[in-house]
Every structure is written in structure tokens, then in C-alpha cells.
Image (spheres, grey):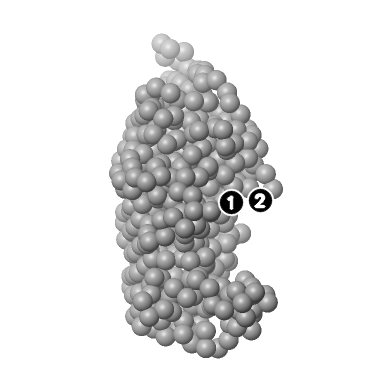
Amino acid sequence: MKKIFNLFAIVIVFSSTLLVGCGPDGGGDDPKPQTETITKSGMISEDETWTADKIYLLANKVVVSDGATLTIEPGTIIKGQTGSGSLASALIVAQGGKINAAGTKENPIIFTSILDNIEVGQKSGTNLTENDREKWGGVIILGKAPISAEDGDNLAQIEGIPADDAFGAYGGSDPADNSGTFTYVSIRHGGALIGEGNEINGLTLGGVGTGTTIHHVEVVGTLDDGMECFGGTVNISHAIVAFQGDDGIDLDMNYSGTIDNFIVIHGGDTDEGLEIDGPEGSTYTDGLFTLKNGTIRSTDGAGSAADLKSKAQGTIENCTFSGYTNWVKVRANFDADNSCAVKSDAWKYITDATAKLILKDNQFVGASDVATAVNAYTAVEACEGSLDASAQTALDVAIAAGNNTAPASASGGANTSEFDTWSWTAINGKIN
């Protein structure tokens, strides 16, 4: 996981108007309709609606505070201002705040960069590609659902926001917490750098509960992770992450929801398709994630398919992995101070008689065999000798028992038709 941002400049909410179009009101050679641009920054403390006939510009951070609801009409375009460090732009929904962003297939809600030439009524601009990253920040939603943070904490501060800023808190004891609705939303060209090795994710979910509705979401061309869940229980369906700079889907702090029908597309400089960690502390250690009906694909062999580590616990099922030379990595942990005794980690959870980590009915398309596609590793240099052939054999047995295969072509995975006509990835011919 990476820090979200390290400074937050408190600024006053303000609006400004920019009229686009050079034709006179009564006619003339250029009858192009004028578009109003509303600039937003700072705290939203009362209910507010953003309408599809205007473009909204995020200047620095915009925070939907406790008790407020931000409604975004279908078809609305939101553009993030360029800037790094404390000037990075982002939309943050704080605990107790709500977002009502209910786009539709015909009229998706689009978050993009101020540099994007997309206009009102369009679904895609023409001047930015999947390689245009780091042009603004991203979207952060924080809720009150359980998390498993360090030191046994069930409440944490999203990294980078000072501890005395209450809007940075996430986590709690309400698995059904409701942060609102986020549907048919496309997030493009984000990941602004705010420090060395520290960028904003495309979509960050911290302690978001099952009362929140999230489906048909896209993150494309972001510099850091596409979508990262810090704990929480929210269920997500029909999600696509394409051409991210780091991990496609990153699960931390014992996220225990279900992500169903998802796509991760790798290309260029990137890291993992899936990166999964389990509980970090002693609270909320029983939650299990589910990832199912997914397509995880590298377009050029870059990156690895998945890194399962740090007590990852849950189920990955009916997913297809293809295009990789580095496939699924499963971390084994050892106690260097205790004769390299095995400690709880992903390898132990997947090889135990009563497994907490299960891979079943997955396809590693083009791999020579399943054993080649799923491999154990350890980060404990002093105990590398403990990761011997028997450790890999135990992992091979567990993977084979889950009916995982290595076919020449895929027959499972995501239903890509769910992304037709509304997502940048499909519109621009990048989904296959």
C-alpha cells in the first residue's frame, strides 16, 4: 500500500464561472453552446448537487464532510486540476458524508484531468491516452465498517492526512455502514505524485460498508493502484482497472467484501494484477474476501498476476490470468528468531487442512502447467533455506485440489459486455 497524500491545505470553498464558446448569444458563425465551469475546493458541509450541464473543476482537495451529501447527476464531468504535493486534487468523502453518484450506461459520470478535451455530452475526449497518468489525484471514500489496522486498532487515519483532521478517519464497527452510491463512474488519468514514491490511487475505499452501492466503476491510466480497499465490507461488481502504474486491485487490512465480474488490464510499467494482504492487527481477523469472475491480463508480459501475502485470507474463483511470464506469488513467512518456524501467512493459509485462502476453478492461460503458475516465496532472507521443495509441493497439492487449470485459451473470467459503450477502455478499443 502507499500513502494517499502527506499534506492537506485547508482552503475556502469557492465557485467561479468560465464560459466556453465564442459565438454571440443571438447566433453568428459559431453557435456552440456555452459551458459553465464551476471550481470547487475545500469542505462541502451542506447537501449539494452537481449537474450534467456544467463541468466541475477540483482545485486541490474537496471534502464531503460528516452529515453532507454530494449528489452528482448522470453524465456529469468532473475535471481535476494539475498539481502535486499539497496541491494535488482529489474528491474525499469523509466518514458520515455521502456521495450519490448514480450514473447510467447511457450517461456515465466521468472524473478526469483538466487537460482532457472531453466536453459536456461526450463519453471520451480525443487528446489523452492510457499512458497519460498523474494528471490529477483521485477519489477517496471513507466509512465506518470494520478494519484490521496495526496495534489492534479498528479505527485508522488515511495515510497522509494529519491526525487532527477528523475527515481522514476510517474504520469502526458497522459492517453495514452506508457511504452512498457510486455507479457507472469512470476515473481517468489520475495518481498525482505527492511525495517520493507516494501517489493517490484512482479509487481508494477505507472502511466502506455494505450499505454502500458500488458497481460499474472504471479506473484507467492512473499512476498508482487502480482500486485499493483498506478493510471494509462493501461489495463491488462490474469493475475495470486498466493500465495502472502499480497494482490493479489492492486489498489491505482484511477487506472482507466481494468483488464480482472484474477486469484488470496490464500494460507498460506496472506491478501486480492483484495484491492481497490480510489483517494487520488483532481486531477483525475473521473476515474473508471473495474475488470471482475476473479477467486479469497483461498486454506485454509486464508485472505479475498476483501477490498473495501477509495473512491473505479469502477466495479467488473462476478467474482467468493470461499474458504473464510471472504468475501468482504466495508468500511464506518464517520466524528467524525461532529456528525459522513457520508463521501465519498466505502460504500457511492455503496449505492448511482447513484452508483460509482458497484458489478454485481458475485458469492460468498459456502457462505450461498449474505448478509453474503458482509459486511460493519468502521475504525472510535468513530463512530462505526453509522454503524447500516440500513447501512448493504442498502448495502444488492445494492448487491442484481447487480444480485450477492451465488451458491454451480462456473459457471463464469476466463478462466484458458489462463495460460496453460507457467505459473509456471499451470506447477506445482497449478491452480485448
Q: Can you give x and y, in whole percent of width and height, for residue 276 in the image?
A: 48, 62
Q: What residue is disc 1 on? A: 2
Mark 2 burial class by Cα count in 10 Å: few <14, some 14-19, many 20+ = few
- For the point 66% across and 51% down, which residue is it? 197
Residue 180 image-quadrant placement = top left
Mark identifier at residue 197: 2
Q: Earlier in the sequence, mark 1 or mark 2?
A: 1
Q: Can you give x and y, in whole percent of width and height, for residue 10 in the image?
A: 58, 26
Q: Is there any visible trace of residue 243 in the rendered image?
A: no
Q: Can you give x and y, in whole percent of width and height, for residue 254 in the image?
A: 44, 57
Residue 423 against residue 378 in the figure, above or below: above
Query: Does the residue at mark 1 contact the one at mark 2 (Cβ under 8 Å)?
Result: yes
Q: CA distance from mark 1 to mark 2?
A: 8 Å
Label 2's element?
Answer: loop
Q: Nearer the viewer, residue 12 or 67?
A: 67
Q: Nearer the viewer, residue 18 or 162?
A: 162
Pick the quarter of the image with the C terminus: bottom left
- For the point 37% across and 67% down, which residue is it? 315
Q: Nearer the viewer, residue 273 or 98?
A: 98
Residue 133 against residue 21 in the figure, above or below: below
- For the point 37% across and 59% down, which residue is it? 287
Q: How many marks?
A: 2
Q: Callout 2, which amino acid?
A: Gly
Q: Is there any visible trace of residue 14 in the rendered image?
A: yes
Mark 1 burial class by Cα count in 10 Å: few <14, some 14-19, many 20+ = some
Q: Callout 1, which amino acid?
A: Lys
- For the point 48% across and 66% down, which residue is it? 311
